Image: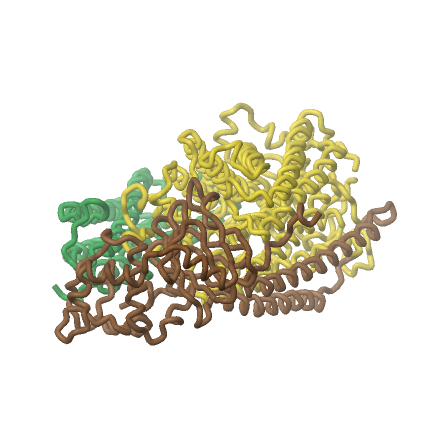
Amino acid sequence: MSTTAGHAAGGSNYLTAEHGLKSWLLTKDHKRIAVLYLISVSFFFMLGGLFASLVRAELLTPAGDLLSADSYNRAFTMHGVIMVFFFLIPAIPAVLGNFLVPVMIGAKDLAFPRINLLSWYVYNLAGLLGVWVLLQGGVDTGWTFYTPYSSVYSNTAVIPAAMAGFVAGFSSILTALNFVVTIHRMRAPGLTWFRLPLFIWSHYATSLIILLGTPVLAITLLALVLERGFGLGIFDPAMGGDPVLFQHLFWFYSHPAVYIMILPAMGIQSELVAAFARKRVFGYPVVAFASLAIAILGFLVWGHHMFTSSQSVYASTVFSVLTMLVAVPSAVKVFNWTATLHEGSISYETPMLYALGFIGLFTIGGLTGVMLGTMGIDLHVHDTYFVVAHFHYVMVGGTILGYLGGLHYWWPKMFGRMYNQFWSRIAAIVVFIGFNLTFLPQFVVGYLGMPRRYWSYPAEFQIWNVLSTAGATVLGLGLALPLVYLLMSLKNGALAGNNPWGAKGLEWETTSPPPTFNFDTPPVVTEEAYAYADSHLVEAGHSDKKGKKELHGV
Amino acid sequence: MSDHSSSTLAHHFDSHEQQREASTVGMWAFLVTEIMFFGGLFLAYVLYRSRYPQTFADASNHLNVIWGGVNTVVLIASSLTMALAVRAAQLANRKTIVLMLILTLVLGCVFLGIKAVEYKEKFDHHLVPGKNFQYDGANGQKAQIFFSLYFAMTGLHAVHMVIGAGLLIWMIVLAHKGVFTAEYHNHIENVGLYWHFVDIVWIFLFPLLYLLGFHVGH
Amino acid sequence: MVESFPMFPPQASTVASEVDALYWTWIAISAVSSLLIALAVAFFLVRYRRTPEHQTGHPERAAGMLEVIWSVIPLVICLGMFVWGTKVFFDLARPPANAVEYWATGKQWMWKFQHPNGRREINELHVPTGQPIKLTMISEDTIHSMFVPAFRVKSDVLPGRYTTVWFEPTKPGKYHMFCAEYCGTEHSLMGGSIYVMEPAEYAAWLAGEVPGQPRATGQELFTSLACVTCHDAGDQQRGPSLTGVFGSEVKLATGSTVLADESYLRESILTPAAKLVEGYDPLMPTYQGQVTEEQLMSLVDYIKSLGGQKAASAAPAASSGGPVAASTGG
């Protein structure tokens, strides 16, 4: 797609409104805070990726040769802690959500701009704690911090690591508070709940999970710190405590946390499919309610992480059947996205390539998820590479592909420039191939019996590990490419214009980049979300709405 | 926009009403997270109490019901003065706001003082879990869980009280400056909500921790 | 080719083929549904690609019935697989009544086993074919997990509480045994081999070395720790008789009852006052720190040998009371 030169040069935008480092560090503009988050989150993504490459390099051979056992344990723990708490959870809400939630609902800012800035500082404080953990030699408990290993037996920096997770949790709570209040109270005139873009619905559902789940993780980590640091005994078997209680509390948060990571990506997915098929998302209300259903059911299935933990068999049965139920809204979403393509007008720009990849990978991630929820299989594959492969399909195939798709979709809006279309398409394809090559073999080696968190392994597992490491190399390359061409676009990219994709939505009505208060004149909404057909097809049966035609500036 | 007193209306809100609603919804959402936060410890309490009921009842008798009771009265009184402060803010009665806030602060400090005395007692009697724990009842090992929960729950509650005291001081300064008007007193209402929440947590803690063993007798 | 790209662990237990069948069914369902979605997407991508004449998608069509259909179909499939999976799970979780009890202790980073006749092994376990075997396990430190891929079984091994896993080996051979729950530095080395042998071969192997008899050891401990002075089956004893206690419902001082399973016996040795039997004073001293987990196992095993009503099925596997199934004590 060629880019149209916008008239943005005339007025000042949020990037040029003020100058100097101080204007950034003290900004209350949600868009600038989103950019700050983009920088922080990218840093931690690369750090987490570094640890991933150490892990994959060690697993190239069966013997533990590259790293010592202790170093390996620290490497996979740091990979998990950084990726989960510092990348996957904040990435989409804190970067894209922060930028887009107010713009998409026609507000001037989030409800609490100061709290929004505070959340970025809290995130970085948590990040500093994380870096401090690294300087202390890392932590080796796994990102799950299971007691009593973490409370009694580990000799590593568990307390600062748990505190890092604790503090990071507060930054997501602050962001979620802002979203809930903003979505409830600050929508533009005419923007009713069922005219909201699905991106907003999914962020709303995500925020509810964050508000209800994160505090439980916070208190759990705090109890762990009190136990390890001050000798209080809440999980300690020596005092009659129950280490399995920790697992219940941990997963009560950490299973919904999976939905904190995937729901925003599903929201992006809906936007992308609609925009590049130029068609209203099929079954809009169903997709919206599916997000809420996932958020609610997501709180009732934590015990499926604990089928082997000595949990009562009857409790396990209940958790298993609820897991089957939560699969349904996810499946329905996939079907609706597919159906949206039907009779669309489909183009294959980079964001769409990510969206198509998402459908494929998330389908596999979801199907292997219900396999794990089937107890007879879980007993065999629990804590093996099968689980590792499954959650990477959801977390990388889902969340990261969604994030990258969204970043490529809204990049021209955020920075007013278009990136290289050729290289960005190549990158999307390389990521897809590399990803599958990395994680498909892990399903096989997992069923074969290779437990996770293994530093050395029997020789017959090697071939699959070699394939996986080779795939990880390709994947790493594919993920490094956007860093280059996106940064280059900031300087050399063609001006994007207000609406380079010919997409619908309030964010495409304002200039690129938007002005500080998002809109020169406050928008009034008079139509449904994704009303693509209206202005072109008279037989659509909808009356032609005024004032929306200039959107198709292609 | 239509409002004349634009100094108290943030730029991104359209009206004072929208601003007030936003801050109220935000505060309630925050209190929900607080409930979940304390909820984790309450769950642990329920689990262990159902597992070791006798031990919990015995250990409960090592707490000082008199001090706990006095503190309950003190906190309820502070909630009353807090509510009166909010009422005064609605009526834009500056002097009463300041007076009631100061009373609330004093009562909060009394609570914390009594709590400190109780903690010292526990230290003196070696009832702090860990190496120096000494307990004359049966099942000392498991009694440590009770005292662990006692310190974790009341400690967390006390931290909330300290934060509340800080907020009160901030509100006293603002009220003294005359910031609050009949249409703009979101801050004081939110601090009030927070204070009542902390109070309610204690209303649950007191019977669960102090009165639990009462029927066992001493 | 197949050997250099192994895809399935050997099927060496009675349940292995059942688990594999379940797995294959899911794989088939997944493959078909993924393929259908992929084909639909591919077809739409080509058929509805953007052309100069075709710049905007068709307006939405009514979704109603379609949404119901594609909600119900996955739901029915998932629930069907749930029923089957749960049946397999109960088969895996509940040892049959004729299972022979072996004991295992996990500690950083080794497994210690004890055969019914007292023979001990470390990181190796020899078992006969054709005989259901129940491993009763406990950890001396952090959480471990017993995992034998060839048997398709796994169970976490906890400190402070017995858990069990059972299997009936079918095929002689040497199989991997792993620790599946991360337990520290040498987690990946905490494993070993299970040797499955024909019964005759196993008997010969057992006879090869004279072991310490656990019943005898348990009995010796019972005497040397002076348990016998209070729990002797006389009339004026200070402690309750232990004959036949295993597997029975014990009435507690608090009025409630508790099932006397392995974990209850162990708890009563370590913290006697926790669940005091009705009619007795809390006189018994704690044995915490005075007996090792292995000695405890011997003691528990001895007490079980004193006659039990429903000895073999007393402790349903994996239900000895996590927080969800908080034990009824007190």
Residue under the point 72% across and 44% down: A352
Q: Residue furthest right?
A: C53
Viewer-side residue, A554 vs A204? A204
Residue under the point 25% across and 63% down: C219
Write down the quadrant of residue A412 in the picture: top right
Q: Is residue A155 left or right of residue A19?
A: left
Q: Is residue A209 visible?
A: no
Q: Is residue C207 left or right of residue C297?
A: right
Q: Residue furthest top?
A: A20
Q: Is residue C30 left or right of residue A132?
A: right
Viewer-side residue, A426 vs C87? C87
Q: Is residue B189 left or right of residue A552?
A: left
Give the x, y percent position of residue A57. Answer: 58, 34
Give the x, y percent position of residue A266. Answer: 62, 51
Colour scheme of this structure image? by chain
Q: Is residue A63 above or below residue C2?
A: above
Residue under the point 21% across and 44% down: B131
Q: Is residue A81 visible?
A: yes
Give the x, y percent position of residue A489. Answer: 69, 29
Q: Tell me how many marks there are.
A: 0
Give the x, y percent position of residue B179. Answer: 36, 40
Quadrant location of the C terminus of chain B in the rendered image: bottom left
| Chain the render paints yellow | A
| Chain the render paints green | B
Q: Is residue C72 above or below residue B64?
A: below
| Chain the render paints brown | C
